[in-house]
Image (tube, rainbow, N blue to C red):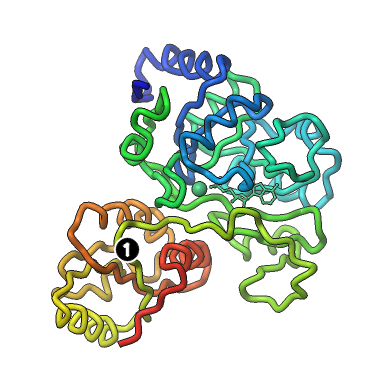
Amino acid sequence: MKTTRLVVDNDVNKTQVYTQAVEKLKSGEVVAFPTETVYGLGAIATNELAVAKIFEAKGRPSDNPLIVHVGESQHILKYVSEISKKAENCIDAFWPGPLTLILHAKPNVFAPNVTAGLSTVGLRMPDHPVALELLKMLGEPVAAPSANLSGKPSPTTALHVEKDLQGRIPLILDGGATGIGVESTVVDFTVDPPVILRPGGVTAQMLSAVIGEVIEPNTTTVDDATVPRAPGMKYAHYAPDAPVYLIESNLDAVDLAIQSIHTQNQKVALLAPNELKNDQADWFFSLGDQQNPEESAHHLYAHLRACDDTAADIILVTLPLKTGVGAAIFNRLEKAADGNWWHS
Ligand code: AMP
Ligand code: MG
């Protein structure tokens, strides 16, 4: 299959580009498009065969449900059987934006492979002009996971999508680099208090300001039975080719680690904020200012991917502060490192 990448800008050909994408989707094909978080790979969420092509192109396990993207927030009762006041308030506060709400799905609306057979569905309205224009022109809900090969870091540029999915999908809409850089926050509103299943662009503090108590499974001790586990969380994720090790944010610890790696004749790539730059590292990728997790999030996946273009044997990543979007960065790094911590 030939993969076409079409740049979407403010040119006169804009309508033509969207029309092509809408036609592809309506004919049961998949299309990659930018959102404010990462690039998504979309198919019409009511078309089971089209949705199956997402799983096939990504190599994604079929028991990992997809998030459904909508172009407006007014009519979500078409898709869900009920909606709590808290969920409504969060939609008012954060849509369009990086918040996915898990709600009870209306039966027989979505293709069964969208929800992996669950009775719940994850819904979000993205805050990106290209995604919104596409969704509005299409007038249908779009199931879309990140547009990468399953297990790889999510794509934050159209070139990342091309690298992973060239020859596997027909069309990529290129809207430049995404803004936030990590995926949406996934919150389960079928339980009360709501539970954060995946930290993301909307932080726990932002949610609490609107709906009071929210449960963060990583920081709150809760009975296992009361916390619904997010499907898909068991899979390896966000991983570059070389092994990733997390290391404490400390100049001496980083220095010792690099020395010890070099003693074993191995090469090391370091991902760290500017404050922890180390000239002994064979490659250094800056995560920006330590106090600015938004900046780190924006660069994270591009840097993890860039490590694949180096000859590094080991990737060291310093531990981010867990505040704000830092919680999402920490969550992704834990998965990228598969729990590996560097101990000198
Ligand atoms: P991705 O599409 O790769 O950004 O991942 C989407 C994630 O959203 C999945 O891995 C799930 O953890 C979560 N998700 C989507 N739908 C549901 C659902 N119905 N219930 C619980 N979690 C969900
Ligand atoms: Mg993904």
Instruction: Judge whether 196 appears above or below 16 on screen.
Output: below
Quadrant, the N terminus: top left
Q: Residue at x 34, y 70 (%)?
A: 317
Q: Position of residue 25 (x, y in %)?
A: 54, 20
Quadrant, the C terminus: bottom left
Left or right, 155 with reference to 115: left
For label 1, being within 8 Å of ligand 2 is answered: no
Q: Position of residue 183 (x, y in %)?
A: 51, 50
Q: Position of residue 50 (x, y in %)?
A: 58, 25
Instruction: Judge whether 190 appears above or below 340 on screen.
Output: above
Instruction: Judge whether 109 appears above or below 82 on screen.
Output: above
Q: Quadrant of residue 95?
A: top right
Q: Position of residue 329 (x, y in %)?
A: 46, 63
Left or right, 305 with reference to 216: left
Instruction: Judge whether 88 appears above or below 333 on screen.
Output: above
Q: Residue at x 48, y 19 (%)?
A: 21
From the viewer's side, name the closer residue of 303 and 14.
303
Q: Residue at x 80, y 53 (%)?
A: 190
Q: Residue type at mark 1?
A: Leu
Residue that label 1 marks: 287
Left or right, 262 with reference to 21: left
Q: Residue at x 25, y 82 (%)?
A: 257
Total marks placed: 1
> Badge 1: how crowded within 10 Å, few (<14), some, or many (20+)?
many
Q: Which SS class for mark 1? A: loop
Q: Quadrant of residue 303?
A: bottom left
From the viewer's side, name the closer residue of 307 and 74.
307
